[in-house]
Each structure stands twice: as structure tokens, then as C-alpha cells.
């Protein structure tokens, strides 16, 4: 009888986490959004919609993917949502060359 290898669930979960993060980064619009957030340190979704020339529904879709991947942070103040870069997570994931695109001077 063949022995079935036991899958390392913690390793699988780690791979799934990184897959989600890199999938979020693998879209030019989301990289542009992250860059805009970086330039302003914190940005209101209303301003980001104008800057990115995206309808709010499309912008919300991209922001949710970035949030789910923990690449950005969201703070709600009243009726507005403000986004900032999760610098610790981005620096952990990206090379020095790529990190420079998302650092505020």
C-alpha cells in the first residue's frame, strides 16, 4: 500500500498568503493606486477616484484586493475612507529596487 504524503498545511497557508499578495501586485492599476497613496501618504477615496480617472466601483474593487492582501490600510472617518500604504508589509515583500517606488521621501 502506497503511503500518502501528509501536506504541510502551514506551508500551504503561507503559499496562499503570498499568492494573494503577489496577485494584488500583478496589476498595473493597483500599482498606480499604491503609488498615488504613497505620494500623498494618505488619500481619501474621493480624491483617489478623480486622480485615477476610475469610477468609484472599479476603484473599490482594486482597493479591496489591496486591503485583502494587507498592502494598504484603511481608516474610516465619518463617511469617508482614507487609505495609506502598509509600509511594513510592502518592505517585507519587495526588493529594494521595487520598494523605492512606494517610499515617501
Image (cartoon, rainbow, N blue to C red):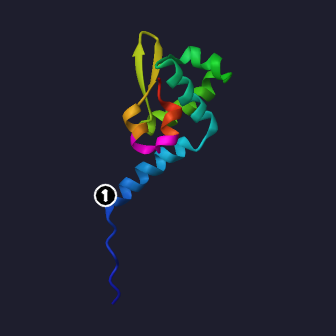
Residue 5's spot in the image, x, y percent?
Answer: 34, 76
Q: Is residue 92 positioned above or below 61 on the image? A: below
Residue placed furthest toward the top: 78
* Dominant secondary structure, magenta: helix
Q: Report the span colored magenta.
A: 92-97
For the point 32% across and 61% down, which residue is it? 9
Q: Is residue 6 left or right of residue 65?
A: left
Secondary element under disc 1, as helix, strand or loop, is helix
Quarter of the image with the N terminus in it: bottom left
Whether residue 96 appears in magenta in the rendering, the answer is yes
* Residue visible at 39% across and 38% down in the picture: 89
* Residue at x 53%, y 41% (from the top left corner): 24
Judge by depth and name the residue closer to the eye, 92 or 97: 97
For residue 3: magenta?
no
Residue 42 at what x, y percent from top left? 46, 18
Residue on which the image places disc 1: 10
Depth order, front residue of 2/41: 41
Amino acid at each position: 500500500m502506497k503511503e500518502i504524503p501528509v501536506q504541510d498545511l502551514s506551508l500551504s497557508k503561507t503559499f496562499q498568503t503570498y499568492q494573494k499578495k503577489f496577485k494584488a501586485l500583478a496589476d498595473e492599476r493597483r500599482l498606480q493606486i499604491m503609488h498615488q497613496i504613497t505620494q500623498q501618504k494618505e488619500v481619501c477615496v474621493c480624491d483617489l477616484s478623480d486622480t485615477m480617472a476610475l469610477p468609484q466601483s472599479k476603484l473599490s474593487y482594486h482597493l479591496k484586493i489591496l486591503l485583502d492582501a494587507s498592502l494598504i490600510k484603511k481608516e474610516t472617518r465619518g463617511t469617508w475612507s482614507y487609505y495609506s500604504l502598509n509600509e511594513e508589509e510592502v518592505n517585507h515583500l519587495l526588493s529594494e529596487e521595487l520598494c523605492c517606488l512606494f517610499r515617501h521621501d
